[in-house]
Image: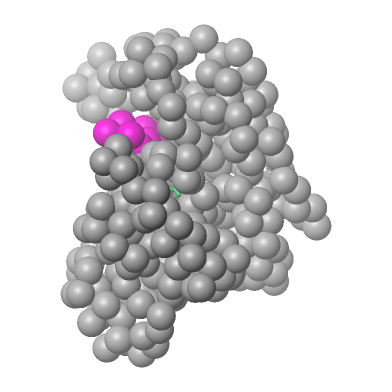
Amino acid sequence: MERRDFIKTGLISAAAPTLILADVETIKRSRNPMALSTWNHGLKANEEAMKLLLSQGNALDAVEAGVKISEADPTIQSVGLGGRPDKDGHVTLDACIMDSQGNAGSVAYLQDIKHPVSVARKVMELTDHVMLVGQGAKSFAITHGFKEENLLTEESRTAWLKWKKKLGKKDDLGPNDDHDTISLLAQDSIGNLAGACTTSGLAYKIPGRVGDSPIIGAGLFVDNEIGAAGATGRGEEVIKVAGSFLIVELMRQGYAPQDACKEALGRTIGRHDGELAFQIAYIALRKDGEIGAAAIRKGFKYALSSGNKNKLHSVKGIIN
Ligand code: ASP
């Protein structure tokens, strides 16, 4: 193999998937505009994204507009306004966005700003940086016209107080069953891809904790030549395998999106010898419109919209 070819294909292509794929279900879709997102609230996000996509809007505007619906909804306690706070009662948000040119913007540990995805987009478009965090991200947002507001709703505050009352030493890392980040991937009518990912992160996390969602290549990755992938679930574990980047690279090597998602989960399952109590789920959208979705455990759902259909699909967990 020529050195150039080796660099292009990498090592992974030589290896077969390390996981036996039990329920591979490959879903073919047309190349019409489409939106693919995580969890039930993905339905409303898709709906908003599709409004733009069906009126010749671009994929970047669509993913931003889509996830802003989840960020603004106080009943969704895993994203934006009303998100569950950290251990000390502060809502701290992580988000990122990527366009079809490979540009990326990200914010982490952002407080008091309802739409972190839009701040991430401003980082991408107005600066030569990729990521801003904490007070720096907040000052940048305010400079660019974002309003400072309290994001801790009464409902999330009450739940936090209840959790605090029962807090034992073991709870220091927060519960691990909290996982409703929205990742939204879209393809527009000219075939361009974009993605966005936004979350309040793990509930009752250690103050300062940042998960996978704002990390380019972990919570989200887009390569307009190949496809896009997004994650939800235990962020620490997604970061350790660079989950979304891995999925896009596996698709580059010829893996179907579904197989790529399962292979990425297989890396994490393998690291834990199959003994793991947390959830991770991935979604993937290949350039030709084929999609994949897989989860470690049962309970994960994804929302898929194309044409005038927008439906929620359940995914069988790999280990239960
Ligand atoms: N991935 C997120 C994080 O670790 C959690 C989630 O999906 O809600 O911050």
Q: Is residue 169 left or right of residue 235?
A: left
Quadrant of the rendering where the N terminus is positioned: top left
Instruction: Residue 32: give x, y in percent of width and height.
Output: 70, 52
5 left or right of 303?
A: left
User: In this rendering, is residue 278 above or below 89?
Assistant: above
Q: Give the image location of residue 128, x and y in percent.
A: 20, 69
Quick check: can you spot residue 112? yes
| Residue 66 visible here | no
Q: State the image quarter where residue 124 is shown.
A: bottom left
Which quadrant holds residue 138? bottom left
User: Could you tell me which residue is drawn at 31 percent across and 57 percent down?
Assistant: 87
| Majority secondary structure in the magenta region | helix
Residue 242 in magenta? Answer: yes
Question: Which residue shows up at 27% across the image and 88% down it?
Answer: 143
Locate residue 100, reporting x and y percent.
43, 57
- Give the residues drawn in magenta, as a range: 237-247
Residue at (46%, 35%) from the top-left corner?
280
Count up the numbered dots. Answer: 0
Task: Say which of 227 and 262 sits in front.
Answer: 262
